[in-house]
Amino acid sequence: MPHPSGSTSRPATTPFTVNGRTYCPPPRPVAVLCLDGCGDEYLDVSLAHGSMPHLGRLTQQGYRGMVRGALPSFTNVNNAAIVTGLPPAQTGIGGNYFLDPDSGEEVMMNSSRYLRADTILAAAATAGRRVAMVTAKDKLREILSHKMQGISFSAEKANQAVVETHGITDVETIVDRPTPPIYSADASLFVLHAGVRLIEQGLADFLYLSLTDYMQHKYPPEAAESLDFYRAMDTEIGRLVELGAIVAATADHGMNAKTKLDGSPNVLFLESLLTQRFGAGIRVICPITDPYVVHHGALGSAVTVYLPPALNVAEVARWLIELPGVTEVYDRALSARKLELPADRIGDLFVLSARDVVLGRTPEHHDVSALAGPLRSHGGRYEEMVPMVLSGPLRPEYVAKAAADPRNFDIFDFAVNGVHA
């Protein structure tokens, strides 16, 4: 990928079509933000405390509402959906982690070889936009920049970016900040500031900026640390708006406390429970699993269950739904139809839990000692609804779309086609 040179030329307005949608980009920068882990309550509390004045003005001048994310409400699932405009059944990304049916091995789904759709970012670059994709977590970089000609790097490994593979080098100099620790507020703030600097220097005019949810995993909305973090984010959002960008923000998922009254993790170890009831050979896969164990200890509110052939799927499903803390159980066909999941990348059953409950395999599979504080996690129905904020007023047809059942993976459509530019 060639190193883009600074440019003050007008952004390209050539329409492009990808995955059945046509996008007509405006003659100004577009910055789509994925505020990882940002349930709407974080914005409510921050606004109430005066921590987000720029967002407050955006809400008055533009649009703020709720959208439905993809299930399971995990990072890889929803980021892949957002950059393609498609649900997981079509992207093929149904979790951070899955059982590969070809090899029988449990693997991370962080490679673009698992993605089954083209991205909006790649199509925009082909249409002449100067595209940049900046993510906090390096695990997302390859998937999100699939086939894209432009800039792509992570805050986590910013100092390792080179022109040949990232479309840019000397990131720390360009952003004017050192590479941050991934377990920090700075990991997200680096991404936002990078977006500001890339627009300022004419290196990008079509951006996807994906943050990390370390702070939301660690702190509830009312914590002083959260308010400081959202205040700092608001400053960068204000700078993007001042640069003339259409700013569109949504989230991949929300966040909830998953603890008992004594503060300990509220976990159902399903593989242990199922083995005790039905015998050996049952495998539970936790699709939240990723390298960032300090966030959640691989404990989330959705799992998929693989059963040996001798077991009756309907009988196991009936037993599971009776467990306190289990709220929904679907077989493979119903999961694909109702939850929009890729049928070949889930087990015989897909299980979701209550707002305050996480699902695990066995106690031995999860190291909760690494957690940064009381367990806060996501993955289920109760983290599915997330905010959507747009910096300008909506066109009439998009007012109607926003009042229907908008999805977080409609955000590029709203930002590019739906805002009065």
Image (cartoon, rainbow, N blue to C red):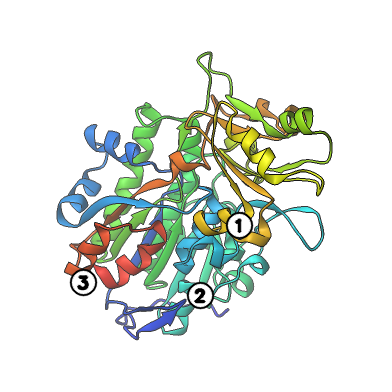
Q: Position of residue 217 (x, y in %)?
A: 50, 35
Few, some or many residues within 10 Å of mark 2 (<14, 14–19, 20+): many
- Judging from the image, what secondary structure is the residue with disc 2 in? loop
Discs 1, 2 touching: Cβ within 8 Å: no
Q: Position of residue 49 (x, y in %)?
A: 24, 32
Give the number of the mark in front: 1 or 3.
1
Give the number of the mark in front: 1 or 2.
1
- Identify the residue under disc 2: 150
Task: Using the numbered discs, state the Cα–Cα distance from disc 1 to disc 2 in whole angstroms.
Answer: 39 Å
- Residue at 47% in and 66% down: 86
Task: Using the numbered discs, state the Cα–Cα distance from disc 2 to disc 3 in whole angstroms.
Answer: 24 Å
Q: In this rendered view, identify the residue nearer to me: 345 or 109.
A: 345
Left or right, residue 6 beside residue 77: left
- Identify the residue under disc 1: 333
- Label 1 sits on what residue type? Ala
Instruction: State which tag comes first along the sequence, 1 or 3.
Output: 1
Q: Is residue 238 visible?
A: yes
- Label 2 sits on what residue type? Gly
Give the number of the mark in front: 2 or 3.
3
- Identify the residue under disc 3: 421
Instruction: State which tag comes first along the sequence, 1 or 2.
Output: 2
- Residue at 47% in and 72% down: 121
Few, some or many residues within 10 Å of mark 1 (<14, 14–19, 20+): some
- Judging from the image, what secondary structure is the residue with disc 1 in? helix
Q: In this rendered view, identify the residue nearer to me: 31 or 249.
A: 249
Few, some or many residues within 10 Å of mark 3 (<14, 14–19, 20+): some
Instruction: State which tag comes first along the sequence, 2 or 3.
Output: 2
- Residue at 61% in and 27% down: 267
- Label 3 sits on what residue type? Ala
